[in-house]
Image (cartoon, rainbow, N blue to C red):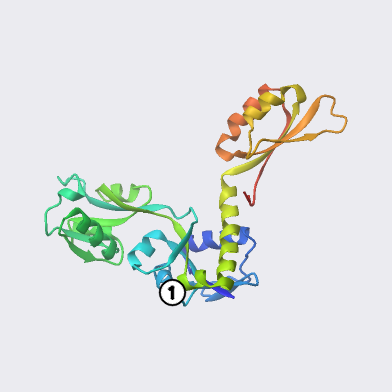
Amino acid sequence: MLRIAIPNKGRLANQTLTLFEKAGLKADSRVDRALVANLGSEFRAIFVRAQDISEFVADGAADLGVTGADLVAESGQSVEELLDLEYGKCRLAVAVREESTITEARLMEAGTRVATSFPRVTKSFFDKLGVSVKVAPVSGAAEIAPHLGVADVIVDLVSTGSTLKVNGLKELDTILTSSAWLIANRAAVADPESGEKISELVTALESVIRARSKRYLMANVPRDRLPEVKQVIPGLSGPTIVEIQNGNGWVAAHAVVEADKIYQTIIRLKALGAEGILVTPIERLMP
């Protein structure tokens, strides 16, 4: 079995297990404090801290892992980044107190203290700007540091920015954007046997991710309006047209449609005389 390191708690853990289940790899057991679980017959999940996953994968303790791109960058470990899983989205931002006169990170004075739980990435960012700062590592709650006089500036994860505003801070720059990624041990990818299994896993997960933003639409439409219907629901490579028994001038049009366009699509189909419109979710979508 290939070992997949998965976060042991929190939203990232839940979203990861849900994604794998939709791909047909449901954990055979998942209780609090569990250390391992089988995902089908070819993969075994090991549950560890998200911040340790990059190191586990790089060292070969795990063949694959799911963790945030921010944590991969901070670890500095050499791993193969295989697939953006498109959840856990956030950004690593530079922020100061609202009343600060600093408007850009590159204009900060030399020796400015910066509190962060991402010291490696932070130092690299300011080094590239040519600004010499003093990094003050903290384990969490960096937003309190400017109010306690621990630091003048913070570098912290931001999703909506509301936490910064609540704590009287304003955002200056974004160092990087992050989301959950599937990463792999380089040797495991290079090995023919494990590499094939990894490739198959990536394909399965991609099919689930691809389906998230799509819907399957079916509608009965007048045959003489087909040219216009095809403009409304082009689908992946044109709609599938199915004959209706005793249709009397009607056919069934099936197509994959962008979820955020369903509302307008139905309105346009109704205007063309469509009936019996049905929209369903898609579990997996292979190209």
Q: Which of these two is toward me, 259 or 181?
A: 181
Q: Position of residue 60 (x, y in %)?
A: 46, 76
Q: Residues within 10 Å of mark 1 (few under 14, many from 20)?
A: many
Q: Relative to 31, does residue 118 appear above or below in the rendering? A: above
Asked if residue 54 lies left or right of residue 144, the reply is right
The quadrant of the image that shows the N terminus is bottom right
- Determine which quarter of the picture holds residue 231: top right
Q: Is residue 175 visible?
A: yes
Q: Relative to 129, does residue 200 appear above or below in the rendering? A: below
Q: Position of residue 271 (x, y in %)?
A: 66, 22
Which residue sits at x=59%, y=67%? 196
Which residue sits at x=42%, y=76%? 59
Q: Position of residue 133 (x, y in %)?
A: 16, 60
Which residue sits at x=42%, y=67%? 79
Disc 1: which residue: 56
Number of numbered discs present?
A: 1
Q: Which of these two is toward me, 240 or 248?
A: 240
| Residue lying at the far right of the rendered structure | 246
Asked if residue 258 lies left or right of residue 240, the reply is left
Q: Position of residue 199 (x, y in %)?
A: 57, 63
Which residue sits at x=50%, y=64%? 13
Badge 1 marks a residue whose secondary structure is helix
- Determine which quarter of the picture holds residue 216: top right
Q: Is residue 5 visible?
A: no
Asked if residue 279 lies left or right of residue 198, the reply is right
Asked if residue 220 lies left or right of residue 109, the reply is right
- Determine which quarter of the picture holds residue 244: top right
Q: Name the kind of residue labelled 1 in the image.
A: Phe
Q: Which of these two is toward me, 105 or 115?
A: 105
